[in-house]
Amino acid sequence: MKVVILTTCTGEGHNTASSAIAEAFRDMNWDVFIIDIFAKFSPRVGKFISRAYDSCTTKNPAFFGKLYQVGVKTSIPNRKSIVYHFSSVYAGRVYEELKRINADAVICPHIFCAQAVTKIIRKYGLDIPTMGVITDYAWSPYWEETLLNMYVIADQDISHEFIKRGMKKESLYPLGIPIHKKFISPAKDICEAKANLGLDPDKRHYLVMGGSMGFGDYEGLISALVAKDATANITALCGNNRNLQDSLKSKGFGENVKIFGFADNVDELMDSADVLITKPGGLSTTEAVNKQVPMVLTSPIPGSEAPNIEYYVSRGMALYADTSSKAAEYAYNVVNDEQLRKSIIQAQKTYAKPNASKRIAELVALEARVARGN
């Protein structure tokens, strides 16, 4: 059996979700094809969109937020938005690729891909299961325009938002946000995890993250953490933002502050962290919840990530700080207040959905067998 997972280069979260779903399918001995529709069919457009997205979110987040609000106001069921027309350009080539592969199912963790598949359904018809995967803890614009069979959402509690926007209740599956298996294994002993990374087990460890684009006030946050807890270890991950990484290294924060770019051992870093300070991206926060790492959320990308804060804070799974100084203060409080720390971790245990990737694969496999008549 073969599954095609369509993704895009707009942020790393959708690629991470795609990879996590692929991992679950491979465990079931399916052949998996992950296709970045821009990289595959128009690399120049893909590079432009990727750079524009990173630049807009990091350099002019307020403008990005306004664009998002335009999407909220103009997103209406059964209409053909500019997003649909833009994504439709690639529909024919995506359809030919699906036929060439002889796919048994197609999964879309990004709205652009879902719109392209919707165009295929309208123009050519498609007799295989189609699934959309929403990677934030809220409805996002334009999903109600699409015509996929199934939509995976993060939680049953947010289903009313999608239904209100015109999506069918029976098409919604609250399975959670897909993450890799390495994030669902029990967290290692924190002292052992620190020692494995060369950190002093007796010192606190603050982990700072801002997504693949290195979003947020890193300099202000690190400075505030150093002032608050001078002997602690601080690890900052800058993602693909090399300029940020170089700039922070030049600040001379001290030997206890480690600055890295993209890291492929985030699971190990989370195991070793007393607290995580991060923007509220859907994937990274879901990974942290399943690792049971207390979180302080800060610097949301306007629009898509702001609702994640409400979801986590209202359920006691994280704290939110609207300034770097508050974030440092809250993080310090978390590592020093055992009752607060235990309360956050218990809430995370209550709401975690560690098997989302596996359940997504199993659902698609079932639908594919039905479609095949098996």
Image (tube, helix red, strand yellow):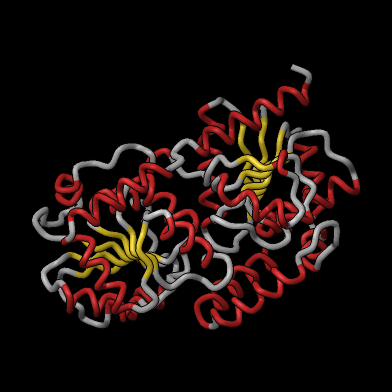
> Taking 160 as reference, is 119 left or right?
right
| Image location of residue 69, percent across then percent down | 66, 74
With 155 as the anchor, is 170 left or right in this view? right
Q: Residue furthest right?
A: 123
Residue 372 is at least partly visible in this image: yes
The one of 40 and 254 positioned closer to us in this rendering: 254
Which residue lies at the image location 46% right of the left edge and 40% below the top edge? 353
What residue do we see at 28% from left, 53% from top?
269
Quadrant of the image containing the N terminus: top right
Image height of 133 relative to 111, above or below:
above
Query: Where in the figure is residue 19, as x and y percent of width and height?
Result: 53, 45
Q: Position of residue 211 (x, y in %)?
A: 44, 64
**Closer to the camera, 353 or 184?**
353
- Residue 2 in the image: above or below residue 123: above
| Residue ranking furthest to the top | 374
> Which quadrant of the rendered structure holds the C terminus?
top right
Q: Identify which residue is drawn at 62% across, 31% down.
A: 31
